[in-house]
Image (cartoon, rainbow, N blue to C red):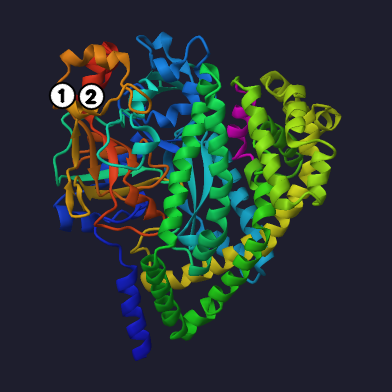
Amino acid sequence: MKALVRALALLAIGGAAHADEGMWTVDNFPTRAVKEKYGVDISQAWLDKVRLATTRISGCTGSFISPDGLMLTNHHCSWACVSQLSTPENDLWEKGFLARTRAEERRCPTQQVEVLVGMEDVTPKINAVTRGLDDTAANTATKQELTRLEQACEEASKKDKKTGELACEAVELYQGGQHFIYRYQRHEDARLVFAPEQPIAGFGGDPDNFQFPRWCLDMSVLRVYTKDGKPLRTPNFLRVNFDGPQENQPVFVSGHPGSTERLLTVEELKTLRNSFLPFWLQRNSELRGRYIQFAKGGEEQNRITQDSLISVENSIKVRRKELDALLDDRLMAAKAQEEQELRAAVNADPSLRAIAGTAWDDMAKAQAAYRDMLVAHTMIENNGAFNSVLYTHARNIVRGTAEREKPNTERLREYTDAALPPVVQRLKAKTPVYPDLERLKFSYSTERMREWLGPDDELVRKVLGAESPDSLAAKLVNGSKLADPEVRTRLWEGGSAAVAASDDPMIVLARSVDPAARAIRKRYEDEVEAPTRNASERIARARFRIRGTSTYPDATFTLRLNYGSVQGWTEKGEPVQPFTQLGRLFERATGQDPFRVPQTWIAARPQLDLTTRYNLSTNSDITGGNSGSPLIDARGDLVGLMFDGNIHSIAGSYWFDTQLNRAVAVHPAIIQEALTKVYKADALYAEISGAKK
């Protein structure tokens, strides 16, 4: 009993959230802790308004800032839209974009906007259907039940006159300790209203990325429309306070953080450190080099490469610092200690030992199996060998048409009825495909397939035959008609018969690869996913018995709320102030990318207030997916636009360091200065500032 008490006490200390740490679900926000630390009362009405004002978009977050569907997010969250709307004659990356009237607003071809309107805890239902099953059967039953619940939710919404048709999504929290169905309003018509030039939105580029001080106008504005082409009515919008926050002021971040791994076991972290991250970095670092070389081929090559290049540069820096974090002995020692304390608590209690006593050993076996198949699974099932927009379309057509013929609960999860709308939207969207870039990406990825799987691998020989990666890429890209959305739509709507009859070379390739891809996927699901899910859920159940929901779950690209304050930090003995000012932008400018200031700003400089606050830092606990999140004050006003973190924040995937982790936001004052003095965006500014009155 003494051993159990000691273990539980240590566990409670090790598991307690640090000050201002936490990506909390909106139904479990620690209002008492906020009140005790900051003296701020967060009401249910405040939480509801913030939830309904926060949007989820592709890989990012946005927020409504007017009653007519005006949505603020980051410029880098609109890259796909800006790229898709750009042409050689009208390069929106370089020129920027401003719709001076609503008639000039341009629809983003593939953008979807979702608003969380409801949540249902379905954990008991999942527990009921998996009770007594082995790992593989339980994994299958879980997926089928989640699909059934999603389908039932969507069908019920169609009959609900109050909510209207909703999109329903299964959400797993606490490593399987909880299961929810989240209900979203989904909108497929988002139109670009404003985007500054890339040189000012991303000033400093890769050298400044994850650094602070910063000077980035990383913002864009879209408007969401209804199905009948009218601006969406959004009464729950955030009023923009252009004065922004003050140092040490309490602030909140509402958004959709993508993924954290703070609850992973030590074995899972070792897999990331020793296998996954090195493999990822090796492949993508070389790809970055090829992008850079390709972009130097001319203005058009540079234009069409920017989206891919900036994305991979950003990802490389993230992965590199994640690897650095896992190579930090402090982190691994702390994780090992916390895990030992939890295991001690479990082993000291017979009821807990019956639940999770062998879970860590089972997890270790699953991780060993994953390491054995990591390369093949990445290359074949996750398309690491076939990096191509055209191949992605082909894969979705081949798989999607086959899966649609099955009952909904028996499909792969990415092709269930609930998951299909974004897939169909992308297939039917009129988006540019650049053959030169496609050939580069496809050739490179098949080279790596041959290198990592070996030239004698059965699938390598099947794919390449007598071709080289370059000649195969040329034959497939030049011969495919899948760049045409009408061709893709005909194949999709024609079903498996149309796919089987197609002689499009990308479709032929996807058909030939699919059996091997499905086989490695099945092996992964049975040997890795199923036992990992089972072990994680058992650990989660034990942790729940001890802690309940007093801690927050890992990020899952679902709505979370964080509290913190505006503050700098101390870097190598030197204080870093939490605000930057406009004047320093011009002092740092060199006239050459990535430190080039656009001509619009140079022309407007005499009218600008160079003391205007530009970017700011907070101790907010955020991660990828929080890009575009509103920074909100206690009154519920928007006082900043999150867009990045400092270099220390990348380790936040695994732990939160209250002394060093900082998030970075665009200050509202520079948004006001830019709209009124640089871009003369009178109508847009009037709509935003009118929302403030």
Examine the rendered structure and indicate whether residue 321 appears above or below residue 99.
Answer: below
Q: Nearer the viewer, residue 461 or 180?
A: 461
Q: Which residue is mark 2?
A: 586
Q: Nearer the viewer, residue 187 or 252?
A: 252
Q: Please tell me the numbered disc located at residue 127.
A: none
Q: Residue at x 42, y 40 (%)?
A: 116
Q: Is residue 423 magenta?
A: yes
Q: Is residue 396 magenta?
A: no
Q: Residue at x 33, y 27 (%)?
A: 595
Q: Residue at x 37, y 88 (%)?
A: 3
The answer to whether one can see residue 58 in this image is no
Examine the rendered structure and indicate whether residue 319 appears above or below residue 154.
Answer: below
Q: Quadrant of the N terminus?
A: bottom left
Q: Please tell me the numbered disc located at residue 610.
A: 1
The answer to whether one can see residue 652 in this image is yes
**Whole-Å distance between the Cαs marked 2 and 1?**
9 Å
**SS assignment at label 2:** helix
Q: Nearer the viewer, residue 471 or 275?
A: 471
Residues at circles 2 and 1 in contact by the CB criterion of under 8 Å: yes
Magenta residue span: 416-429
Examine the residues drawn in magenta and state their main secondary structure: helix
